[in-house]
Amino acid sequence: MNRIKFLSVVTVCSGLFVPLLHSTYCFSKTAIDENTSKFVNDNLGGIDVANEQYKQGLNYAKYGLYDEAIEMYKKSLVLEPNNTDAYKNMGIAYAQKGMYDNAIEAFLKVVERKPGDYDACYNLGTAYFDKGVYDKAIESFKKTIQISPDHRSTYFLLGIAYAKVGKYDDAVQILKKRIEFDPNLATSYSNLGIVYSMKGSDKEALAEFKKALDIDPIHENALYNIALLYDKTGNTDEAIRYYNRTVEVNMGNSDAQYRLGKNYIKKKQYDDAITAFQTAVMSNPANIEIYNDIGNTYKAKGMDKDAEGYFSLYKKQSKSNKAKQQ
C-alpha cells in the first residue's frame, strides 16, 4: 500500500509530523503574563501558593517532566480552579504524553470558560486530531478560524482533517487558503498535492509537488510522493530517479529505499536492488518482507545459497511475529 506523507507546521513545536496519515503534532503554548496570574491565599501570610505551584508546573514541563508538571497544575487548580492557563498547560502536558482524553477534558474547561480563546480551540482540535476524531477536530479548527482568521497552523490541520474524512474538495479549498498566507512555503504545496493524489487527480498532484520542489529542491515528502506517482503509473525510470533523490535527502527513509529496490528488480539491476533492500531493513527491521525480497533477488541472480539464507531468516522472523501476536 502506498504511504503518502503529510507534513505539518504548528505554532510552537519541538519537532515536525510528519508523515501523511501518520503524524505527531505539537501544541501551541500561550505566553504567561505572571503579573495577571497572582492568586493570593491570605491564610498563608500572603504567599501565592497557587501561582507558585502553577509556575513550578511550567518549569517541570519545560524539561519534559510532564507527570510532575501535571501534579503541580492539579494542586494549583485546587486553590484556584478558574486559572484557565493552568488547564491549558495541563492539557498540553497530557497531549505530550499521548493521553488525549485527558488533554481534551482540560482544553474543554478552557473553552467553556473562555470561548474566545483561539489557542484553546486550536489545541482542542489538535488533541481530537491526534486521537483520530476528525469530525470533532474539524469543528474545533473551524471555530479557531472564526475567532482568528489568520491562525495559519489551523489551515494546515483543518485541510488534512478534511482529507482524512474524504472531504477532498473542502481540503483543497482550505489548503489553497493556507498558500495565500505564505506563497513560498513548500510544505503547503506538498500537502495540497497529497490531497489531489488522494482524490485521484494525479496530474494536479504532480503539479503541486513540483511547485514544492521549485521552492525547496530537497523537500523530502514532495520527492517521495512524486516517486510514488511515477511508480503508480509504471514509469519505472522516473520512479527510480525520484526515489534516489529522496534517499539522497534522507538515507534512512526505509519506504523509499524499499520501493527503490522493487523498481531496480523491474530493471534487473539486482545488485542495486540488494543494496537498497539492505539499507531499508537497517532503517526498519520490522519490515520482515524485505528479507523475502532480498532472497528473491539473490535467487534471480542464481545465488541460491545466499537466497536460502534470507528465506530462512524471513521464515524465522515470521514465526517470531506470529508467536508475539498470540
Image (cartoon, grey):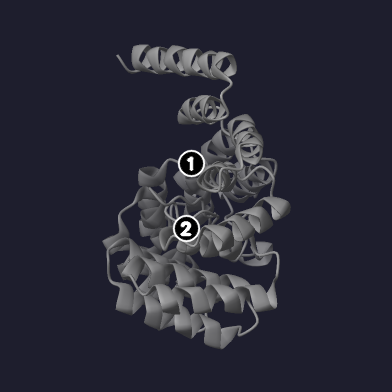
For marks 1 and 2, give the CA distance.
53 Å
Instruction: Specify few, some or many for label 2: CA neighbours under 10 Å numbering under 14, 14-19, or 20 or more.
Output: many
Amino acid type, residue under disc 2 in the picture: Asp
**Quadrant showing the C terminus:** top left
Instruction: Specify few, some or many for label 1: CA neighbours under 10 Å numbering under 14, 14-19, or 20 or more.
Output: many
Q: Do the residues labelled 1 and 2 touch (CB within 8 Å)?
A: no
Identify the residue position indicated by label 1 in the image.
74
Disc 2 secondary structure class? helix
Disc 1 secondary structure class? helix
Which of the two labelled residues, at mark 1 and mark 2, occupies the earlier sequence position? Answer: 1
Viewer-nearest residue: 304 or 21: 304
Identify the residue position indicated by label 2 in the image.
231
Q: Is residue 200 rendered to the left or right of residue 54?
A: left
Compared to 312, does 163 lie above or below?
Answer: below
Amino acid type, residue under disc 1 in the picture: Lys
Q: Where is residue 302 in the image (x, y as percent from the top left)?
A: 56, 24
**Which of the 4 quarters of the picture holds residue 63?**
top right
Residue 149 in view (yes/no): no
Give the foreground label among 1 and 2.
2
Name the residue located 64 percent from the left edge and 30 percent from the top edge: 282
Compared to 248, does 206 lie above or below?
Answer: below
Q: Position of residue 48 (x, y in %)?
A: 63, 49
Q: Is residue 243 rendered to the left or right of residue 104?
A: right
- How many numbered marks, from 0 up? 2
